Amino acid sequence: MSAPDGAPVLVLAVPGTPSAEARSLAEEVVSIARAELPGLHAVVAFTEGEGEEYPALQEVLTEVTAGRVESPDEPPAVVVPLLAGPDSVQLRGLRQAVLNSGSGAALTEVLGPHPLLAEAVHVRLSEAGLARADRARLFTVATAADGIILVTVGGEEAVQAAGITGMLLSARLAVPVLTAGLDTEGSVAAAARQLLESGSQQLALAPCLIGPEVPEGLLAAAAEEAGCAMAEPLGAYPSVGKLVLSAYTGHLGIQPQPASAH
């Protein structure tokens, strides 16, 4: 299936401080979405961007919707936040930018919680040698963690949403998983303490985060605080691109191939 003629533009909204790394990651996510839905018109914008290198969301919306014929059935553009969970501050800024653009663009929900995010976190943990790559195999990884701290940013709502992904991850790994907010003081240390008190001996920090939304150094500081090893953020894992596309097509009521977890 290809994108319908005249379909709205997919605008991937990248949170956090713009950087070359964030732009590269976002472009890779967009490439995955395009591969899943040929003919898709997708662009990258930054919630805190400015200038040609890191175009701001409001300006991108004004540009991509200029001259488009308004349709009562669908918006000229669909903005998909590159966020794994509901960060209220980020989402408030996104809504304001969409409103201020006067473009009539639509804003989708964030990407999680979703089984595909649990799969992606599992893969990142296995890549770091902190989890078995395949639960169907009987061998164990010597460095595998027996307690996982799943971290997010965005306040209590984000922690609760990550908790759902955490339950799915716990079922995949058969180890306890607790969620914590990187932006809540003492949250990571409290989760580490609770896991250790309940019998876990080897902990691991797992970000339920794409990457650009995390201030630099925050993850490493949290891992140090908890005294444990750390997996990488989800980044441009294929499932992230599929979830971005799923948010876009779901909003429009078109479904290429439904996103599904292994």
Image (cartoon, helix red, strand yellow):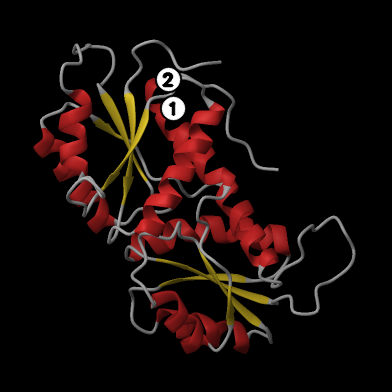
Callout 2 amino acid? Gly
Going by the image, does 152 lie left or right of 105?
right
In space, the residues marked 1 and 2 are separated at their CA atoms by 5 Å
Q: Position of residue 43 (x, y in %)?
A: 34, 35
Q: Position of residue 19 (x, y in %)?
A: 33, 59
Dots 1, 2 in contact, CB < 8 A = yes
Give the residue number, with chain letter if any, for mark 2. 253
Going by the image, does 48 lie left or right of 160?
left
Specify whether residue 83 is in view: no
Against 79, residue 85 (above or below) is below
Callout 1 amino acid? Gly
Image mark for residue 91: none
Q: Nearer the viewer, residue 45 or 117?
A: 45
Q: Position of residue 67 (x, y in %)?
A: 16, 16
Going by the image, does 42 lie left or right of 196?
left
Identify which residue is drawn at 19% across, 51% down: 93
Image mark for residue 250: 1
Identify which residue is drawn at 28% across, 12% down: 73
